[in-house]
Amino acid sequence: ILDASIQDSSSFHQQQQHNNNVRRSSSLHMATNPTESVFLTPETAKACVECAQGTPLYAYSLDKLDSFSDACLAFPNAYGLRVRYAMKACPNAAILQFFSSKGIHIDASSGYEVKRAMAAGIPAEHISLSTQELPEDFADLIDQGVLLNACSVSQLERFAKHYEQKPGMKVGIRVNPGVGSGGFSKSTTSFSKTNVGGPSSSFGIWHELVEGPVKDIVEKYGLNVERIHTHIGSGSDPEIWQQVAKKSLSFCKVFPTVHTLNLGGGYKVGRVAGEKTTDLQEIGQPVADAFKAFAAEEGRELQMEIEPGTYLVAMAGAMVSTVQDKVVTTGEGGHVFLKLDAGMTDVLRPSLYGAVHPMTVLPGSGSVEDIGSETEDVVVVGHCCESGDLMTPKPGEPEDLAERSLRKASVGDLLVMDGSGAYCSSMSTKNYNSFPEAPEVLVDREGKPHLIRQRQPLEQVFQNEVQLTDSTIFASAATQEAA
């Protein structure tokens, strides 16, 4: 089911088809009482539940993964394109393997992610590491073929000193270009949870140091800087992304050995009505033209790299849960609450960012005939003993709840939270309240689900705890004296 189909359509046709799919998804989000979610019908949702042996679970659509892959692979470029999947978005081995079958390489954010990707069969030379914490065994990974982007001056120096007997060692440099842009902030310089550029961000080497300490280390140790890397945030403003992409070319001028410019990812994905999805063709063409201008001026034709994560998997994934309780409060400020058998242990984004996800209530029977016409304004909450376990916050305000108009639900119905393919299974408060990690299923092109991760057994939650052999340490001082 992971075999990639060969397509003869042009890049333009692929992007147009992808845009049509996005518009269809948006229209589904706008319907108050839809008969299906973005890619799950009542029947396929029920099949996923049976495959995973209960809820909650994550479901991924192979068709959607294929469509989003084609859109990224069609990104405008002048002299060649390498797409790298930001695996932190959703690192399941089946997802990595499918993208690899499409010719997509990997962007890893830790040494552990590198090893996880390699365990999934990804060749070391297809993995690029850009990390906040350079692993102690970084040299072992590099010697196997992994590419490194130094993300601080000290990382670059550690790399240089380790390989000082090997002049000409190849390395990449991640630069903080001085501005950032994230989906939950309008500022390009202040702190934001989704902003990874500018003076309030620790990611990358500050741009003013490139021609100073960075160049000094490169020359002192005879390093070969072959890549420049920039990334400014998740859900970044397309215009700011374009500006930074063009500015990034100036850093390539500092090192004549650079042959690749990696522009990161962070492309906006519209999960619900009113949110826009970045048009890759629209933002990419001016940048491709800038690469051509650079080549005319510098005599170097740079390869382009992009690192999408959210764009590739967000709308290809959904969290399927069961409405396990319904609570009503009355009077001013009263609400109808739907309590799920999932929550921040599975989808943290609403609690962390105030992110809004499309929701669809489907009948627990799994039959489209049981979809009623009655709707209800509800607040959806999770199963954790935590007041912040809120699935319907006000947009961008995780501290404030909001009602959502959904099909009137009964206990036992399914609630599908779409847009959960990115930063959900990989970024949850797993095991809080000792809830086990949810299983994952991949829905193939015929609508059949395949289990790609089992539900975590409870025993695995606490298997690393060590039993004390000396019980006397529990005794109080008075008890010990009496003894």
Image (spheres, rainbow, N blue to C red):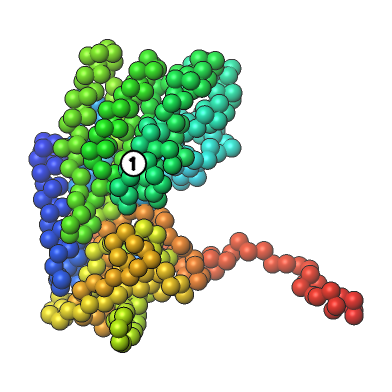
Q: Residue at x 57, y 28 (%)?
A: 158
Residue 28, horizontal then vertical, whole percent: 14, 63
443 relative to 321, above or below: above
**Going 41% across and 47% down the picture, which residue do you hit?**
191
Q: Residue at x 51, y 70 (%)?
A: 434
- Is residue 319 toward the left or the right of residue 200 in the image? left
Q: Is residue 354 above or below residue 176?
A: below
Q: Quadrant of residue 410?
A: bottom left
Whether residue 125 is visible: no
> Total number of numbered labels?
1
Q: Secondary structure at mark 1?
A: loop
Comparing 473 with 185, the one in front is: 185
Q: Is residue 459 above or below residue 296?
A: below
Write the residue at 43% across / 42% down.
200
Where is residue 162? Give x, y as percent: 59, 25
Give the left or right position of residue 139, taking residue 472 as reference.
left
| Residue farthest bottom in this picture | 330
Q: Amino acid at mark 1?
A: Thr
Give how far across and how far down residue 126 sits, in percent: 38, 34
Q: Quadrant of residue 335?
A: bottom left
Q: Which residue is mark 1?
A: 188
Relative to the observer, which residue lies in front, 394 or 161?
A: 394
Residue 82 position in % (x across, y down): 29, 32
Front residue of this view, candidates 460 and 374: 374
Of residue 176 and residue 60, the one placed in the foreground of this image is 176
Asked if residue 139 lies left or right of residue 176, the reply is right
Counting other residues with Cα less than 10 Å from the Cα at mark 1, is it few (<14), some (14-19), or many (20 or more)? many
The quarter in which the C terminus is drawn is bottom right
